């Protein structure tokens, strides 16, 4: 609308109006869509006012009103527009009436300025009873926003019955630092000459995650010269996220009733059949996955390379090597290994799949000393099994070395594996896990091992029992999730490093045979690892301006490991190795396959 001193108004749009006696039930749809253009020019004005979904003007008579359907109010004003007095239900001169709102109710308003927006308005009525178990949603895109009330009472007496719901986080319904602040931002208004009887009604709490504020009280009632009787009874939450808690915090549950929302991460359950970590704690365990994956990769690679294996296995018949030195697996060689690992970690809240490739070299340095080194890269995908966290993509860089000293029949060996990982976490938060969140962080760790044993040789069979100690360490950066829709939902984490000593006992075995004209080596290994404490995951989690909570969980101390493999010669100097490994722990199970191509030189 253009011009000077120009006014355009849209007035009195009603979805339905009744002045009849008896019951009224809406089981269908009441829709209002009102709009006006923009106000452009000197003193031009565009206004929309008196838009109501359902008006019950009953002339002082009683009526039972049941809304079981949908009431949808949409008001759109362009630049410079003003919206005033828009609501879903208006009861006037409705003495003794009852309103039961069990349907869906929403008000969607776009304007420059808006005021007097309400869900239920009771005016000039006595002894009205209201039951409102379902939410009344406000979607407001307004620059200058005045009063927004879920329930507005003027010159009337109202009693709540059963459940009464409020949507916290709605625009215009804000928290208050104390009981005397933000009176016009409270969802219930009791005007002069009015009475509200809370009647021990249950407060049903709904929330809009996009605008919700934490750790600040939401006071419920603005008493503007009226009377508030009784108090609220129970408090019922309606969302699925167990880590968001609502509590009473006001001086009383009556006229000064207030609730507060807090972040309190706790374990999701304590059963043995489902994950035992909270959604927040599951967000932090990605660095555990990268540590386990790199250890499984590294130990499998080093376990059967020169320096990692306690004995050398012949690659030809002894009778064929009478003139030349016997060719063995300890000869100098280079190798390339495609790798795959599946990690089932239900008790840690995730499963993982990792694919990788490693390159290495190894061989004898002296008659009694051998060494092997390798480096590799892996992509790992974690899929979380708790609500909220969805998946994490990891890029893992790992490497290691092995040294063995073999004054036959005794041996001693040392291995070291290190890794560094980049983590790309993605998930959802919010009351109903409807808000997307993401985070990026890094982790690193290492595993060292010193073991020794005795080698028994008998014809084509070799076995080697061993005993040793190992030390595992891993840690990650402190990090925080980011929630673009509402940064108040960002979660912050301070993770503790994990370090512990393990004792180990194991048994290697190998035998040689022929498949046709092809020399083959069958081998296997079984091992038991026992941690001596320290294997507890721990992290501090908090949201902005909230208390810090420590989350922790022990990882099983005992791990049983077994692997089996076969090596056979493709042609002289070239060898193919296939193997399978399994790690069994009370909290996880890791399964790995590898295919190694070796070339001896």
Image: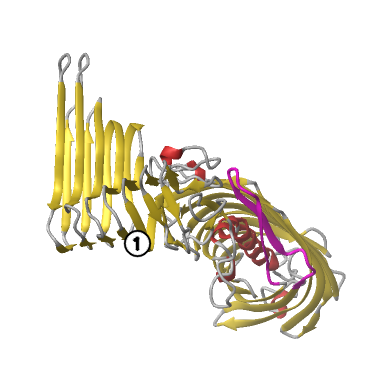
Element on which disc 1 rests: loop
Q: What residue does disc 1 label?
A: 133
Q: Is residue 591 visible?
A: no
Q: Quadrant of the N terminus?
A: top left
Viewer-proximal residue among 279 and 234:
234
Which quadrant is home to the C terminus? Answer: bottom right
Picture residue at 16% right of the left edge, 46% below the top? 32
Q: Residues within 10 Å of mark 1 (few under 14, many from 20)?
A: many
Residue range of the region highlighted in magenta in the rendering: 530-556
Name the residue nearer the viewer: 102 or 390.
Answer: 102
Q: How did the renderer colour the structure?
A: secondary structure
- Nearest the viewer among 204 and 123 is 123
The quadrant holding residue 465 is: bottom right
Q: Position of residue 56 (x, y in %)?
A: 18, 52
Image coords of residue 531 (percent x, y): 76, 70
Q: Residue furthest bottom?
A: 458
**Magenta-span inclusion, residue 127:** no
In this picture, residue 84 sits left or right of residue 373? left
Q: Nearer the viewer, residue 455 or 265?
A: 265
Residue 542 among those drawn in magenta: yes
Where does residue 49 sit, x and y in percent of width and height?
Answer: 20, 35
What residue do we see at 39% from left, 40% from top? 172
Task: State whether residue 516 appears in this view.
Answer: yes
Vertical arrangement, residue 443 with respect to residue 509, above or below: above
Horizontally, residue 125 falls left or right of residue 329, namely left
């Amino acid at each position: 609308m253009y011009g000077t001193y120009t006014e355009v108004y849209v007035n009195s749009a009603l979805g339905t109006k009744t002045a009849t006696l008896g019951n009224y039930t809406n089981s269908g749809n009441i829709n209002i869509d009102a709009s006006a253009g923009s106000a452009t020019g000197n003193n031009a004005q565009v206004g929309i006012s008196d838009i109501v979904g359902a008006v019950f003007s009953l002339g002082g008579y009683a009526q039972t009103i049941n809304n079981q359907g949908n009431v949808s109010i949409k008001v759109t004003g362009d630049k410079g527009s003003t919206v005033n007095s828009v609501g879903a239900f208006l009861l006037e001169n409705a003495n003794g009436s009852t309103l039961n709102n069990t349907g869906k109710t929403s008000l969607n308003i776009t304007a420059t300025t808006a005021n007097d927006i309400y869900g239920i308005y009771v005016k000039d009525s006595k002894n009205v009873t209201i039951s409102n178990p379902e939410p009344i949603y406000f979607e407001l895109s307004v620059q200058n926003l005045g009063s927004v009330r879920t329930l507005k009472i003027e010159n009337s007496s109202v009693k709540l019955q059963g459940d009464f719901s409020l949507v916290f986080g709605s625009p215009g319904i804000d928290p208050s630092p104390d009981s005397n602040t933000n009176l016009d931002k409270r969802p219930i208004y009791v005007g002069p000459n009015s009475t509200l009887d809370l009647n021990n009604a249950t407060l049903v709490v709904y929330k809009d995650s996009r605008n919700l504020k934490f750790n600040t009280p939401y006071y419920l009632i603005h008493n503007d010269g009226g009377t508030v009787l009784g108090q609220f009874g129970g408090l019922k939450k309606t969302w699925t996220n167990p880590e968001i808690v609502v509590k009473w915090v006001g001086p009383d549950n009556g006229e000064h009733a207030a609730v507060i929302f807090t972040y309190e991460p706790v374990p999701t359950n304590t059963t043995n059949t489902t994950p035992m970590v909270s959604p927040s704690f599951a967000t932090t365990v990605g660095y555990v996955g990268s540590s386990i994956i790199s250890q499984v990769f590294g130990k499998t690679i080093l376990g059967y390379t020169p320096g990692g294996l306690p004995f050398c296995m012949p690659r030809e018949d002894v009778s064929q090597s009478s003139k030349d030195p016997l060719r063995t697996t300890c000869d100098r060689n280079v190798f390339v290994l495609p790798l795959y690992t599946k990690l089932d970690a239900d008790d840690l809240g995730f499963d993982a799949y990792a694919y990788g490739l490693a390159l290495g070299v190894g061989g004898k340095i002296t008659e009694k000393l051998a060494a092997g080194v390798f480096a590799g890269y892996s992509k790992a995908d974690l899929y979380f099994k708790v609500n909220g966290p969805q998946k994490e993509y990891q890029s893992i860089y790992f490497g290691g070395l092995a040294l063995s000293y073999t004054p036959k029949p005794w041996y001693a060996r040392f291995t070291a594996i290190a890794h560094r990982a980049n983590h790309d976490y993605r998930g959802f938060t919010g009351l109903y896990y409807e808000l997307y969140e993401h985070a990026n962080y890094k982790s690193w760790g290492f595993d060292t091992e010193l073991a020794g044993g005795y080698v028994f040789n008998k014809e084509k069979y070799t076995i080697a029992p061993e005993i040793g100690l190992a030390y595992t360490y891993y840690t990650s950066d402190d990090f925080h999730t980011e929630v673009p829709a509402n940064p108040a939902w960002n979660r912050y984490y301070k993770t503790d490093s994990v370090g512990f000593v393990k004792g180990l006992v194991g048994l290697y075995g190998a035998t040689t045979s022929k498949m046709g004209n092809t020399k083959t080596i069958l081998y296997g290994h079984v091992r038991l690892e026992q941690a001596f404490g320290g294997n507890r995951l721990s992290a501090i989690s908090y949201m902005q301006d909230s208390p810090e909570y420590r989350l922790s969980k022990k990882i099983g101390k005992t791990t049983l490991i077994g692997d089996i493999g076969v090596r056979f010669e493709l042609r002289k100097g070239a060898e193919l190795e296939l193997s399978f490994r399994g790690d069994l722990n009370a909290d996880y199970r890791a399964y790995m396959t590898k295919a190694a191509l070796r070339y001896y030189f």
